[in-house]
Image (spheres, rainbow, N blue to C red):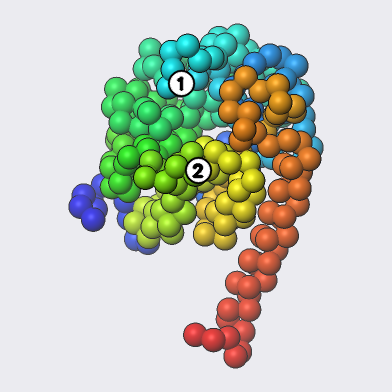
Amino acid sequence: MKNLKLSAFHGNEIKRTTVTVGDVKVGEDFVVIAGPCSVESEEQTIKTAQIVKEAGANMLRGGAFKPRTSPYSFQGLGLKGLKILEKARMETGLPVVTEVTDPRDVSWVCEYADVLQIGTRNMQNFSLLQEVGKVDKPVLLKRGMYSTLEEWLNCAEYILAGGNPNVILCERGIRTFETYTRNTLDLSIVPSVKEVSHLPIIVDPSHGTGRLSIIEPMSLAAMAAGADGIIIEVHYNPDEAVCDKDQAMSPEMFTGLMGKLGRLESCMHELAGLKSAPGWAS
């Protein structure tokens, strides 16, 4: 891999980065970020925030600005949506993760968000990357749908070079010839990132698959692959969701997933201990 002198690289040569968001430490603990695809109303957002908080989520996701393929699709509530997210944070104590799409919006979105998300379509929006590099808020950088690992890390480098060291990478699936799933969730990127970079990486199985039936197994697989967390779409009533209703988990599904993640994490800790026990196969 080229450009190994850059600070986004060097996975095994320096201490791994931990990004602190309130009491949450991304890169140290397995973190679950959950919430609706988009902020639709105060009731929808706060109800969903309360549900994911009770189930054990660490942060709340929700889009106030929604870049959509069609200009006629719901684009988000903008400032009103940000104010709703702020109220949901006050009600639940969950830090807020929300997307910023325009360099001109960065400073005032920072007033409401705890983590600034850069979506897949903006991964190589270099003026936006430079702008979030100037602020002191953590940045969740999603992988571009056609990007290589090196391209992705070089985009992270724009943020780091601007002076912001708090970058969280997010694998959200890449575009391939496969049409059964919305995208192809590349879980091999998780250990690959950890080989060459110090940055924490989480996985988005909701956008990565687009199929409700396989979000749970891909979430468990992400943990098993060594991801530092997941970001999941949850809606208190998925049938009413304005966008991405086919991949929004119900409260019952999300609660069930959280229980399985807890059990899997316990098993992984147990296996890690067994690895050094006498008789372990090399």
Question: What label sits on residue 181 in the rendered view?
Answer: 2
Query: Which callout, 1 or 2, points at the residue further toward the start of the chain?
Result: 1
- Determine the residue positioned at 37% across, 44% down: 176
Q: Is residue 83 above or below residue 259?
A: above
Q: Residue at x 62, y 19 (%)?
A: 242
Mark 2 lies on a secondary structure that is loop
User: Of the residues shown, which amino acid type is indicated by label 2?
Assistant: Thr
Q: Which residue is mark 1?
A: 68
User: Label 1 to label 2, Cα distance in Å?
Assistant: 18 Å
Q: Is residue 7 visible?
A: no
Indicate the amino acid at tag 1.
Arg
Picture coordinates of residue 228 (x, y %)? 54, 50
Q: Nearer the viewer, residue 116 or 72?
A: 72
Q: Nearer the viewer, residue 98 or 179?
A: 179
Residue 68 x/y as whole percent: 46, 21
Tell me whether the residue at label 1 lies in contact with that at label 2, contact meaning CB atoms closer than 8 angstroms. no
Packing grade of label 1 (10 A; few <14, some 14-19, many >=20) is few
